[in-house]
């Protein structure tokens, strides 16, 4: 019995060592900087924030700094998931912008992979929208809305300015996180992000149907303009605190957008305003007619200046010229 027991322990130890080596090799294949390959001993897991089919998300501490750890069960990782995870980390690990959630690194144990990133204290924009809707809160003021849109546009301008450009492909309220009491917004979740592939056709129907650009739904060649369309739908969410096309099934909404050019209704309080103009040009059915995020960010900065001037008694006039910028 002693021999059997000892052999059992040795085989278990060997299996654990094999798992640790495999997971360590997987992390080392993620194209990370040396400083982003973390020792798991540096990570102290705290409260559970959420979980899915193959991972759990924890609040944690990394060298005493509050962070978030996505703990992935390595036994459930297949080749497709390895590819998707490698793509996400390869892109995300190279990003650095105040309006993009910071990637800290990855670690491994015998049974798990740890993906560690910045912790945002105020949850997601979707969660905030749901709270405000339940409370029947008035729509945001133009000053607040423009400031928040400016932050998102700044982060997206950065992504699209990279060489090659990074397409997020899943821009929506659930993927915008809030910090500093909701004063800072940052773009999260790069699981579907891709480098723009030039003339090469990218995967169709990628993202979330309610926010998906018509050309993506129709399996056409697409580019950075698909994110501009999603930005317009996201803006509509921020104006109404509602999910777009909430009375339709996701596939039904996608069909209506792609074939019938259906869009969410312009809120009454935005009719004949620069925001209506921005929505309509950004969600134009033709991708070539949409502005770039550089143009949007510039227009929103100008609008913020005019609003500040108006609030200070300077008589500023709000007039975002995104349509003119796009057409030029």
Image (cartoon, rainbow, N blue to C red):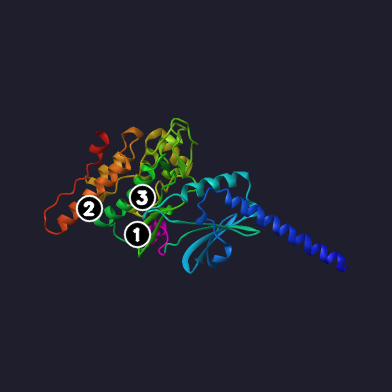
Residue 291 point in image, percent of width and height: 30, 39
**Disc on res. 235:** none
- Mark 1–mark 2 contact, CB under 8 Å? no
Query: Which residue in the structure is indicated by mark 2?
Result: 304
Part of the protein shown in magenta: 121-132
Q: Give me the C-alpha separation between circle 3 and circle 2.
A: 17 Å
- Residue 249, visible in the rendered structure: no
Specify whether 12 is left or right of 155: right
Dominant secondary structure, magenta: helix
Tell me what residue is drawn at x 18 percent, y 52 percent. 306
The crowd level at tag 3 (other Cα within 10 Å; few <14, some 14-19, many 20+) is many
Residue at the (66%, 55%) spot, across then down: 21
Foreground of the two, 4 or 292: 4
Q: Secondary structure at mark 1?
A: strand
* Looking at the image, residue 166 lies above or below residue 123: above
**Nearer the observer, 26 or 231:** 26
Residue tagged 3: 155
Earlier along the polypeptide chain: callout 3 or callout 2? 3
Which residue bears the numbered disc 1? 184
Q: Residues within 10 Å of mark 1 (few under 14, many from 20)?
A: some
> What secondary structure is found at the residue carrying circle 2?
helix
Find residue 163 and report its horizontal and vertical position in percent: 40, 40
């Amino acid at each position: 019995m002693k021999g059997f027991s000892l052999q059992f322990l040795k085989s278990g130890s060997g299996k654990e060592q094999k798992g640790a080596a495999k997971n360590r090799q997987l992390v080392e294949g993620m194209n990370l900087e040396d400083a982003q390959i973390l020792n798991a001993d540096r990570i102290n897991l705290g409260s559970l924030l959420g979980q899915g089919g193959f991972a759990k998300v924890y609040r944690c501490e990394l060298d005493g700094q509050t962070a978030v750890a996505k703990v992935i069960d390595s036994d459930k990782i297949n080749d497709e998931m390895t590819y998707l995870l490698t793509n996400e980390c390869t892109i995300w690990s190279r990003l650095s912008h105040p309006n993009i959630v910071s990637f800290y690194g990855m670690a491994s144990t015998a049974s798990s992979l740890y993906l560690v990133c910045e912790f945002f204290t105020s949850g997601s924009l979707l969660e905030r929208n749901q709270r405000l809707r339940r409370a029947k809160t008035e729509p945001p003021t133009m000053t607040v809305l423009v400031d928040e849109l400016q932050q998102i546009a700044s982060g997206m301008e950065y992504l699209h300015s990279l060489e090659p450009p990074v397409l997020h492909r899943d821009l929506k309220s659930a993927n915008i996180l809030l910090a500093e009491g909701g004063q800072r917004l940052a773009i999260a979740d790069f699981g579907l992000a891709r480098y723009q592939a030039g003339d090469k056709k990218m995967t169709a129907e990628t993202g979330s149907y309610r926010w998906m650009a018509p050309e993506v739904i129709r399996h056409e060649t697409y580019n950075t303009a698909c994110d501009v369309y999603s930005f317009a739908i996201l803006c509509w969410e921020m104006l109404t605190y509602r999910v777009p096309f909430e009375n339709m099934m996701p596939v039904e909404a996608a069909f209506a957008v792609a074939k019938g050019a259906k869009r969410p209704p312009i809120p009454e309080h935005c009719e004949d305003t620069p925001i209506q103009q921005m929505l309509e040009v950004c969600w134009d059915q033709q991708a070539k007619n949409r502005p770039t995020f550089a143009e949007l960010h510039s227009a929103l900065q100008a609008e913020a200046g005019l609003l500040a001037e108006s609030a200070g008694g300077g008589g500023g006039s709000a007039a975002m010229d995104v349509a003119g910028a796009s057409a030029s």
